[in-house]
Image (cartoon, rainbow, N blue to C red):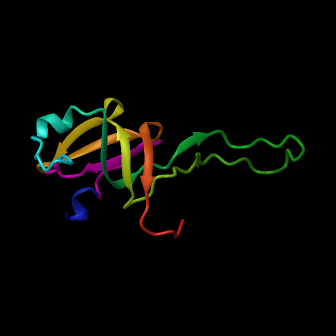
Amino acid sequence: MPTNSVDKFVIVGDRVLIRPKSSTERTKSGLYLPPNVQEKEKVQSGYVIKTGPGYAVAPPQDPDEPWKETTKQPQYIPLQAAVGDLAIYLLNHAHEIEYEDIKYMIVPQSAILLLIRENDDI
């Protein structure tokens, strides 16, 4: 997938952009499920493509140091999801978009049930 196509996206707040896994999955008995059956499942999985800045918080106010310059920049609590993670998320909280014939899901961090991370750098 060319990454330059999603570089234009600005993910807002605590949301995560996910590319769903391909729907050519089989059941344990070896039967292939059609895409419309898999899309009706309540839990889906996909790879994190991009994340928002996190949960916005108010800047700290220190009454003991009134001479200190107050910061006007927004501050955020970062998200746990990182680019490349496999995310298991609730489908009923996700919003589907299609851009350049590729299906993406915009999911709030609170709808992600599990993250599978290949590298342990974080």
Q: Is residue 97 visible?
A: yes
Name the spot of residue 61 as percent of width and height, x first.
77, 41
Q: Is residue 76 left or right of residue 9?
A: right
Q: Which residue corresponds to the image point at 10% horizontal and 46% vertical from the top-left?
A: 32
Residue 24 colored in magenta in the image: yes
Q: Which residue corresponds to the image point at 9% horizontal and 40% vertical from the top-left?
A: 34
Q: Is residue 98 left or right of residue 76?
A: left
Residues in magenta, as a range:
7-26
Q: Is residue 18 left or right of residue 99?
A: right
Name the spot of residue 36 as percent of width and height, x first.
12, 35
Vertical comparison of 3 with 81: above or below: below
Q: Is residue 11 visible?
A: no
Q: Nearer the viewer, residue 33 or 20?
A: 33
Q: Which residue corresponds to the image point at 44% horizontal and 52% vertical from the top-left?
A: 115
Quarter placement of the N terminus: bottom left
Q: Which residue corresponds to the image point at 37% horizontal and 46% vertical from the top-left?
A: 88
Corner quadrant of residue 85: bottom left
Tell how many labels: 0
Query: Given the current orientation, which residue lies at the most extreme front position?
Result: 29
Name the spot of residue 93 as percent of width and height, x first.
36, 31
Q: Nearer the viewer, residue 11 or 71?
A: 11
Residue 85 colored in magenta in the image: no
Query: Given the current orientation, which residue lies at the most extreme top position?
Result: 92
Secondary structure mostly seen in magenta is: loop
Quarter placement of the C terminus: bottom right
Corner quadrant of residue 84: bottom left
Q: Is residue 71 left or right of residue 14?
A: right
